Amino acid sequence: MGVMTERDLAIEDIRKLPTRFAGREVRYYTSVTSTNDLAKEAVAGGAAEGSIIIAAEQTAGKGRLQRPWLSPAGSLAFSVVLYPRLENLPHLVMLAALAAARGVGQVTGLEPQIKWPNDVLVRDKKVCGILVESDVRRGTVGCAVIGIGINVNQKIAAFPDIAPFAASLADELGRPVSRLVLLREVLAEMERLYLSLPGGARAIYEAWRGRLVTLGQMVRVTSATSTVEGVAEDVTPDGNLLLRLADGSLNVVVAGDVTLSGGAPKE
């Protein structure tokens, strides 16, 4: 199985999106360091809300907690520029993960789940990573950038460092997947969810919570300063993880890397 040609991400086709504003302004690159970095540069240049930066390949993609994210040829890597209200910021992580999971499901027929807070899994392996970066000053949001990387048509076996815990859609299906069709589905769903805010915040939270494979499991959470273990009991409406520790106390986790019980560290 080879990598699909770049024709399936032709700029003229990307612009024909079934959306009101998401992707109406498109900047497409064959290879970039990081689409999020370019999106932030675009914001400084006055980019409109819904602008997307898309790359056939990232050479220095970024994941959560300053981890690198591999985006070789055959993958789908893009960033979306938004100008949300401050109260909507916590829901961007949720709606991005939901949009990616739903888009993958609609295009492939697979049943993606979400590992808190926003890793999209298929059959317990990671197929999509999401990084939301925002600029907040004095209680005002300057911008938010949602970066999404999806393993679409690359062969994961070619990347032994991540092969034990990562998957690609093509590997799971045994056939290539159109990145253009997938991009359209994810963007359309993201826009629909974003436009439902703030009134739809509760529905987004409940749908996101309903896909979390993390809940009810014994997990290990690693942050910059500590590692704790416990049962992932629930999540709050603003996205924090509620971890029940062995001594019975409840720990509120705002950010961290979650490893499911018996699992390997994720990408």
Image (cartoon, rainbow, N blue to C red):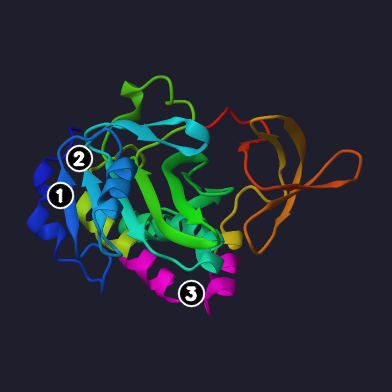
203 falls in the magenta region? yes
For the residues labelled 2 and 3, the Cα–Cα distance comes to 31 Å
Which one is closest to the eye, mark 2 or mark 3? 3
Name the N-terminal-most of marks 2 and 1.
1
Categorize mark 3 by other alpha carbons within 10 Å: few (<14), some (14-19), many (20+): some
* Residue 157 drawn at (x, y percent): 35, 24
Q: Residue at x 37, y 61 (%)?
A: 82
Q: Mainly helix, strand or loop, the magenta region?
A: helix
Residue at mark 2: 56
Element marked by disc 1: helix
* Residue 104 drawn at (x, y percent): 36, 54
* Residue 70 drawn at (x, y percent): 35, 31
Name the N-terminal-most of marks 1 and 3.
1
Q: Residue at x 53, y 80 (%)?
A: 199
For the residues labelled 1 and 3, the Cα–Cα distance comes to 30 Å
Using the image, tell me which numbered label, if any, was put on residue 197: 3
Residue at mark 1: 9
Q: Which stretch appears magenta?
A: 188-207
For the residues labelled 2 and 1, the Cα–Cα distance comes to 8 Å
* Quarter of the rendering occupied by the N terminus: top left
Q: Residue at x 59, y 53 (%)?
A: 212
